[in-house]
Amino acid sequence: MRNSAALSLAQSLVSVMICGTALAAAPVRPPITSVSHLSVYDGDGAKAEAFYVHDLGAVKKADPENAQGVRYYFSPVQFVEVLPLPANAGLNRMDHIAFNTADAEGMRKYLASKKIAVPKAVNKGADASQWFQVKDPEGVTVEFVQAAPASVPANALFPHIIHVGAIIKDRALEDTFYRDVLGFRPYWFGGMKDDAPPSWVSQQVPDGTDWLEYMVTTNTLTQAQMGVLNHFALGVPNMEAVYTKLWNDDRLQGQVDARGQQTVPKIGRDAKWQLNLLDPDGTRAEVMELHAIGKPCCSAFTASDPEK
């Protein structure tokens, strides 16, 4: 009996040690530090360049991910990727959203450990950057980038992409990926009506202040509506100074609202000044002040604002 008990105890200890080793070896999520980019399609490369370079002041660079694409940099590690419009593109002009991580290969292994379908290896660019793509629960393509910072001067007006927005249908389903697996944190939510389910749900990356904004809708959308919802936002400390510069430099040509009137800044439901500009294919560039001027609708801010 004693030998049997001793054997049972030894087996239990071995089992505990094996389990402990397995737990210790489980991949840990690498930091997700910021928005990397929004990738969009445009049908006219020259018009796109005029918008991103002349109007927004971005720096044009070659695209290590796609030889047919172009990157328009706002900071050394943040840009909009513009791809040629495919013949079968349909109405959606967004290709993917992307976030910067400290370790692309580590992120790939971490997501695989969480039963997320990942590629067999990361992609590696000539600039030493690394990246890979996955699909979120609703099929939105999400890319994780280990960036090799580009040599670009600081953008005088727009040095920081503070968030990207993507159309989704089911907030709870998407949370199983962005919050439960990736660790994104609540920031703010709201909509056009205080007593209705939120249409805009923002959550910050786990290791920074940039955020992803769910644009929640189950409606059938036009190309123009998709372009407004699938968007990127440029953070600014002072909207008046930025708008004055855009106006005086003649960078607002063609930016008119539905009534044909000049697009002007307004205060959003989150109590932040914003200015909505559209690229030639309708993707929205939302210029947004970093801080609210007062109390927002619907929800308090539950995390820190970006500072620069």
Image: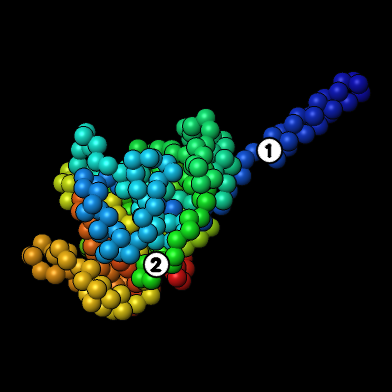
Q: Secondary structure at mark 2?
A: loop
For residue 188, side relative to residue 7 (left or right): left
Of marks 1 and 2, which one's residue comes earlier in the chain? 1
Name the foreground residue: 239 vs 229: 239
Distance Cα–Cα, label 1 vs label 2: 42 Å
Q: Locate the N terminus by quadrant.
A: top right
Q: Quadrant of residue 275?
A: bottom left
State the residue position of label 2: 155
Amino acid under disc 1: Ala
Q: Is residue 163 left or right of residue 128?
A: left
Q: Is residue 23 shown above or below 297?
A: above
Task: Give the vertical position of 33 relative to 82 (above or below).
Answer: below
Q: Which residue is mark 1?
A: 25
Relative height, residue 1 to residue 12 (above, below): above
Kind of residue at disc 2: Asn
Residue 274 figure quarter = bottom left
Instruction: Name the spot of residue 59 as percent of width and height, x first.
Output: 37, 59
Locate residue 28, reporting x and y percent. 61, 44
Tag 1 near tag 2, CB within 8 Å: no
Q: Residue at x 57, y 40 (%)?
A: 105
Q: Nearer the viewer, mark 1 or mark 2?
A: 2
Say the numbered circle drawn on residue 148.
none
How dense is the environment of label 2, judged by Cα within 10 Å: few (below 14), some, or many (20 and up)? Answer: some
Give the SS element for disc 1: helix
Q: Residue at x 24, y 64 (%)?
A: 276
Q: Horizontal and vertical percent for residue 240? A: 28, 79
Q: Is residue 40 visible from the viewing direction of this image?
A: yes
Question: What x and y, as percent, mark residue 39?
Answer: 34, 47
Give the crowd class for mark 1: few <14, some 14-19, many >=20 residues within 10 Å: few
Which residue is at the front of the view, 144 or 73? 73
